[in-house]
Amino acid sequence: MRIVNVVGARPNFVKISPLIREMRRHPVITSVLVHTGQHYDEAMSQQFFAELDIPAADHNLEVRSGSHAIQTAEVMRRLEPLLISARPDVVLVVGDVNSTLGAALTAVKLGIPVVHVEAGLRSFDRAMPEEINRVLTDAISDLLFTTEEGARRNLVREGIAPRKIHFVGNVMADALLASRTRWRTSSIVDQLGLAGTAFAVLTLHRPANVDDPRVFGDLLGALREIGRHIPIVFPVHPRVTSRLAADAAAPGSGRGLIFQPPLGYLDFMALMSRARLVLTDSGGIQEETTMLGVPCLTLRDTTERPVTVTHGTNRVIGTCAKTIVSEALRTLDEPPRPVAPPPLWDGGAARRIVEILLTERLDRRARLRESMAPAPALSASGA
Ligand code: UD1
């Protein structure tokens, strides 16, 4: 079985690592890794490959940055010839970034079965680019692996056949558990001079939070207010660096906020695991804090990962500055009690996925025949 795995952005690298490791245990699987190049800085890409023991990509499409249309189109343009010559049995995509959609669309148009890992998550907010990527990728996938039970309902509601959906748990949890002994020995907390000190961690990168200077300024104001009570480590995503430049130059800026370049996976897990509080607008971090049992406040109006609220440490508190400050101070005073991880977030998701891949028959020719057959209604009417 020849599987082409496509990744492009930081969270994809985390998710693919346990899958590649599991695929390599089965001689019957030939796994090919394609990096679209959506994330390309050393700190956003190579460092993750090294720390998560991901083999070097077999192909790098070097798509890099661009508008959503350009980025998605470039993935398609550059991946198509590669898939035509590699002739995989399956293309596997993870998550919800532009590379995920671009790769899935390229494969389906070549008649190659698509496997989506982390299917069925919905924020029901179509203004989020990731929501569009999720809905469309799921619509054209042949096998859909879900991380939480509610995802099946979302998929079935959208007309996805239940037989294609498998609840397997979370490969992000696999990655976190498999690397635990390594991130536990990271010295990042000492390096930041925070040993023995209570601190919080912040990440922000969503366009809705950082692209409008007024919205971003209000958020930073609230975070500085929290920073008067507890230092906040803020590893800054590249898309935020330029927006921060002017603001960071303002007198008194930085107080309470400890700006950092993007951190590697192991340092970041170590930092979060020892934080009193995490504030974020990321999707994956809501899951990782739930695994780590660290309180998380999500600075968005919605989450596509409700299990992190019902079974985890996450609270979705929106972006109103006053609310952020009061909720952060309240959480510091009364931390939520640690809970057991959500169902199947046990380190076995990649194993379940590969087992299903090996037993499901994803016959490319059968699939092509199916897609080319006239729709029953048309043939019945004799059209
Ligand atoms: C992307 C994903 C988002 C995911 C995030 C994780 C989409 C639509 N968004 O958002 O879902 O949560 O990755 O980080 O796919 N840049 C660099 N170096 C890099 C990568 C990016 O400088 O290595 C800069 C570029 O200026 C680029 C900007 O960051 O324009 C945004 O990168 P992009 O990949 O377009 O989106 P993210 O915001 O990273």
Image (spheres, helix red, strand yellow):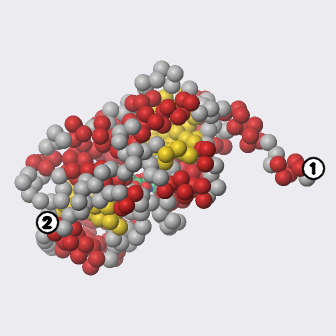
Q: Position of 1 compared to 342: left or right?
A: right
Find numbered disc 1 in the image and state the secondary structure of the residue it sits on: loop
> Where residue 276 appears, x then y in whole percent?
18, 59
Q: CA distance from mark 2 to mark 1?
A: 73 Å
User: Residue placed farthest to the bottom in the image?
Assistant: 322
Query: How dense is the environment of label 2, judged by Cα within 10 Å: few (below 14), some, or many (20 and up)?
Result: many
Residue 286's disc number: none
2 vs 1, front mark: 1
Q: Residue at x 54, y 29 (%)?
A: 358
> Where residue 339 appears, x then y in whole percent?
28, 55
Query: Is residue 107 in view?
Result: no
Q: Residue at x 20, y 64 (%)?
A: 335
Which is more toward the observer, 82 or 193?
193
Total marks drawn?
2
Query: How dense is the environment of label 1, judged by Cα within 10 Å: few (below 14), some, or many (20 and up)?
Result: few
Q: Residue at x 33, y 71 (%)?
A: 317
- Compared to residue 223, the image places residue 47 above or below, namely above
Q: Which residue is mark 2?
A: 230
> Where residue 107 appears, x then y in whole percent?
61, 41
Which quarter of the image is occupied by the N terminus? top right
- Compared to residue 45, the image places residue 257 above or below, namely below
- Ligand 1 resides in the quarter of the picture at bottom left
Residue 382's disc number: 1
- Which numbered disc flags the more N-terminal residue, 2 or 1? 2
Amino acid type at circle 1 is Gly
Which is more toward the observer, 238 or 191?
191
